[in-house]
Amino acid sequence: MKNRYITIYMFGLLMVSATIFNGCKKSDLSPTPTTAIDANDAFTSPGKVEAAMVGLYNLHASGRYMNAMLLQADIKGEDIFVRESGNYGRFAQAYSYAEIPTSIQQAFWEAGYQLIANCNQAIQKIPLAPLTDADKKKYLAEARAIRGSTYFNLIRCYGKPYTLDPTAPGVPKSELPLNADSETLARASVKDIYDFILADLNFAEQNMSASLTKISRLTLPAVQGLLSRVYLSMGDKWVEASKFAKLARTGHPLDDNATLLNGFYKASGEWIWDMEYTADNNPGFVGAASFHEPYDIGYSTFRADINFHALFGADDIRKQQFLISDAGYDDPLLRDEEVEDAGGFLMNKFYFKDGFDASVVLMRSAEMFLNEAEAEAELGNSGPAQAALFEVQRRSIPGAVISTNTGDALKSEIQIERRKELYGEGFRIFDILRRKETLKRTSTSHWHKVNMAPGDNKFLMPIPVEEINANPKITQNPR
């Protein structure tokens, strides 16, 4: 029997779980899912196919996969840091770029390939299931969109940016269900993985059913938003990035400014895609809001850098996201005063419900306006770029006027707006990497200062040692 870590995860099984790898505060306990269905049985009726698809979304929403990615993406930048003491050993390695192949954070690789393995089962079995042609097309579009999104997350963490070196080693490309006798997989190139991602997402965009409107599942606007992100990350597909950003935000107008202070825990009209949790189906204390919240109900270990805090003008309503309630968790979204702690500022953007029944935003129209603005600026279309940027600015800043900047000044203004609008939502390090910027942490907030140029190997997450030991074709990332 050939032995490889990627194969071992899930071949022959599709998880349909009533729990989502819950996390216990101050420990690494993570219960395993409660139910597993043999793949040959999981697609034998319409009801079972639907249950299998729900299982895919449950895996996607786990604490060790999507929540972990959102948190790492912010903590690795310069705007948010994890406090040096009392961090429970979570995200300190990621923040200080001291990750090792045996780190608990490397469960992200395992969770990602577990999800891909289940998507591959679905993609193979759905065409043979007793479904109408329309339902087959709908479910295939969903499964391929989930797989494409998962590869996008993995390649950005374990491979060089496409804009820097598309020929560099990426991640293994698994497009069929694997079994114990399958050949081991080497790392495909970054470009090969991006081509694979685009094939999946373009298929989904062309075949996604208009009947899918629930934003906790992938819908047509969400797939279009993913395409905008992927094209933006490629650095030479600005026309496509702008096109799909416009399509994605259609039907999802920006909320009014008061909504920015509502805690980001329940969906609004602006949201395009989210993860929705219930009291008995959630990631517990390892959910994203647990680390951001200011009241020590969750982990409460993330802080805003003082230089980042200074980017917000006094009249910017988003500055109120740093105001903490004098009543504490009894009235958590009451906004009374700023609180400095551990060298930075407490944040109150995300409300952490102690019952865990809340939603986590994955995509909203503000991002799409900013994608459009960046793409148009890169194309030299200053007018459309200024107009798209202004939609975000005027919502948050009373009396805002449309930018007159052009060229590099406009591009810089757009990136600053991305930082202010999207912090805590999983973007910062990926923006730095795709734009080939130098990561500089210089303020007194940071207990681990860095000056990391584009291409620095420390940006690459190490591949788990179990994968290296099990698969002789896998090469480790240099450090």
Image (cartoon, rainbow, N blue to C red):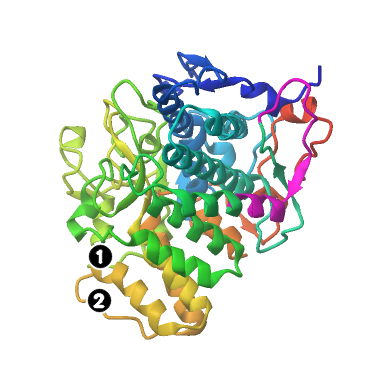
Question: Is residue 35 shown left or right of residue 326?
Answer: right
Q: Crowding near pointer 1: few (<14 within 10 Å), some, many (20+)?
A: many
Question: Is residue 134 shown left or right of residue 65?
Answer: left
Q: Pointer 2 and pointer 1: residues touching (CB < 8 Å)?
A: yes
Question: Is residue 26 shown left or right of residue 6?
Answer: left
Q: Quadrant of the N terminus?
A: top right
Q: Which mark is residue 400?
A: 2
Relative vertical location of residue 382 with respect to residue 258 in this rendering, above or below: below
User: Which residue: 21% across, 33% down?
Assistant: 329
SS class, disc 2: loop
Judging by the rendered image, the residue that carries numbered circle 1 is: 396
- Using the numbered discs, state the Cα–Cα distance from disc 2 to disc 1 in whole angstroms: 8 Å
**In-front residue for pair 314/145:** 145
Residue 283 position, x and y percent, is 40, 27
User: Which residue: 31% across, 38% down?
Assistant: 359
Tell me where the magenta segment starts and ends, as one range.
177-197
